[in-house]
Image (spheres, helix red, strand yellow):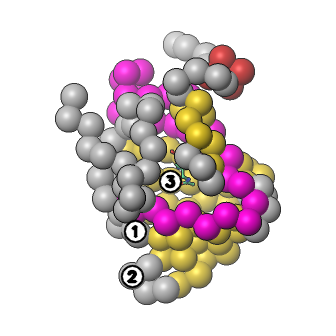
Amino acid sequence: MKVVALEDILGTEHDVDGGNWISRRLITKKDGMGYSVNDTLIKAGTETHIWYQNHLESVYCIEGEGEVVTLSDNKVWPIAKDQLYALDKNDEHLLRARTDMRMVCVFNPPLTGNEVHDENGVYPVDEG
Ligand code: 9YT
């Protein structure tokens, strides 16, 4: 059993600034859970290209609103507080934040904790 407090993550290497977003990595690979959990803030007015080719991600919005555009079909998915979207097909997408958004993000396989997107919006495979 363990308890992780957000305040203990702030200012550490697991408090990652991705530009359009700030991701606080609460549970990472080293915790041995088989998934990772982030508390992520998305900045109002931003659009982020994301394509997690190596991870499945569920994203639960607990504050704010915006939309996701899936690029395979150009479908627009409005997202608001208390809604979760699951990128169950490694979907390439745009994330647009109309307001500041706060998201709980779960990744399988787990993030090591320090990842930022590459130029294609991808996190690398962890070979470790
Ligand atoms: C919601 C989303 O995918 N934002 C990008 C950051 C990423 N989810 C993270 O590492 O927290």
For label 2, the residue is 72
Tell me the distance, in whole angstroms, between the alpha carbons under discs 1 and 3. Answer: 11 Å
Q: Are marks 1 and 2 in contact (CB under 8 Å)?
A: yes
Badge 2: residue crowd in 10 Å (few <14, some 14–19, many ≥20): few
Mark 2 or 3 closer to N-term?
3
Could you tell me which quadrant the C terminus lies in? top left
Q: Residue furthest top?
A: 1
- What is the secondary structure assignment of the residue under circle 2? loop
Q: Is residue 2 left or right of residue 87?
A: right
Measure how far apart labels 2 and 3 are at the Cα level.
18 Å
Q: Earlier in the sequence, mark 1 or mark 3?
A: 3
Circle 3 residues within 10 Å: few <14, some 14–19, many ≥20: some
Q: For mark 3, what is the residue?
A: 58
The answer to if 29 sits in the magenta stretch is yes
Residue at 59% in and 30% down? 15
Horizontal side, residue 87 vs residue 84: left or right: left
Which residue is situated farthest in the left direction here? Answer: 127
In the displayed structure, 107 sits above or below 76; it is above
Residue 19: assigned label: none
Residue lying at 38% horizontally and 37% vertically, measured from the top left = 110
Residue at x-position 49% and y-position 44% = 106
For badge 1, the amino acid type reads: Asp
Instruction: Give the magenta range.
Output: 26-52
The answer, for residue 68, to whether it is visible in the render is: yes
Q: Earlier in the sequence, mark 1 or mark 2?
A: 2
Residue 56 seen in the current view: no
Rendering coords of residue 88 (x, y %): 39, 63
Residue at the disc numbered 1: 91
